[in-house]
Image (tube, helix red, strand yellow):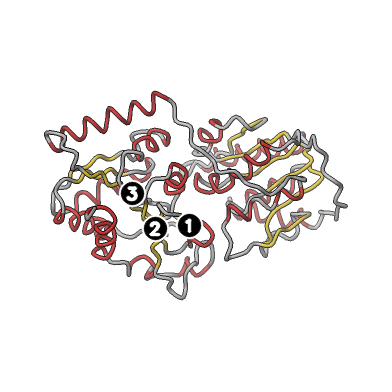
Amino acid sequence: MRIIGLLFLITFQSLKKTKSHKPICSSSKILIVQKAGLGDFLMLLPTLLAISNSDKQIKMNILVSNEVYPLAKRYNIFHSIRILNNDKCNIFIRIKSLLREIIIGIMTPYDVIFQPCSGVNVVTYLLLVFTKAKLKIGFKYPESYNYFDICIDYNQEEKDIIQNSKILKFLGIENTIPTPEIQLNTEEIQFADRLIEKLKKSSFGSITGREKIIGIYPTTMEVYGENSRDWGANKFASFIDCLNNICKDILFIFFGSRYDKKYCEEIISRSLTSPKYFVSAGEVNIFNNCALAKHCNIIVGIDGGFMHFLNIIRIPSIVLWGPTTHKNHGYENTYTTNLSLNVECSPCYGNKILRSCNHRKCLNNIEAGYLCEIVKEKLLTK
């Protein structure tokens, strides 16, 4: 599919004409192409809320992936939400979805198209080529010059949340971005309350108040055919065993998507201390996972979509960074600990260095005992 896309782009990029940048009126119609995952959407969300809260009558239309759709739908700020199917198992479904969006793009002109700083690939460039708009705004990458009327410089030292907000000045909106909230309904909150009580009783017999709940988010995000952010099942198992040897009153909850479930079970099978656990990955939706996370004393995981939710619901967390960097994708606050070895070749996510890397020392050199000591200091000694 990438080869087909590249052929289209080579054919059509020469047809692009330079446009004059007309002022954007207050009643503009904007299309946001957010093809990336949950974390990328959450880093864009403050900008979307700023647009919605402004006095401009801007109709926001957003194109999202399957996994992001339920989250985007919960925020009542969009004129329309459409899904660009990213089914990993069926390329024909993906092509059909892309062709549908191209046809809609040709028939439905917009005042502005905005491509955020994450999720840029051949598919998004195809949409940019075919979709009609007075102004196309995106970020300056080597391959993007021919598809955007305005290219925003991407700063490797700046948070993506801040970088996405640079669209606001072109819309005539003050660059004051709000802090988003995750609105959980009563059913989701009660589900988590009942489940946690049940798990505590089945794991500990009686509830004494000394119990600790530690979340694990191992993430099995695959890039270039392999897991680019994998700390390793043995490392996670050793970490769990280390904590169990210090304190027996720990319940581990494994978070993630349906793609993470087998990996979570593999981690448990490699543990030598028979941990008390519950695998939430693949069993409940993202909102139920957030409700469960609120019961955790701390959550440890790799950079990924779920860790961005923890920032919004303000849950203490330790985030392991390797191919990606907290300088762009992380958060600096009192409840987030960013753990990075800052090796010389990191960050490498999204470039050819990651494709050829055979050591992943940015993650592999983080020792389970070292992480265990951090958790012990933050939680078990209090």
Using the rendered image of the protein, determine whether residue 161 is visible from the camera's viewpoint. yes
Residue type marked 1: Glu
- Rendered location of residue 50, percent (x, y): 65, 41
What residue does disc 3 label? 299
Separation (CA) of disc 3 from disc 1: 16 Å
Question: Is the residue marked by circle 3 packed among few (<14), some (14-19), or many (20+) residues within 10 Å?
Answer: many
Mark 3 / mark 2, whichever is N-terminal: 3
Q: Is residue 186 above or below residue 144?
A: above
Please state which amino acid type lies under the numbered disc 2: Thr
For the point 81% across and 54% down, the residue is 16
Q: Amino acid at mark 3?
A: Ile
For mark 2, what is the residue? 337
Q: Nearer the viewer, residue 157 or 15?
A: 157
Q: Is 227 left, or right, of 136 in this rendering?
A: left
- Residue 11 x/y as whole percent: 75, 55
Which quadrant would residue 178 be assigned to in this image? Answer: top right
Residue found at the very far bottom of the displayed protein: 344
Tell me, for residue 267, which label it has, or none.
Answer: none
Give the labeled residue for mark 1: 332
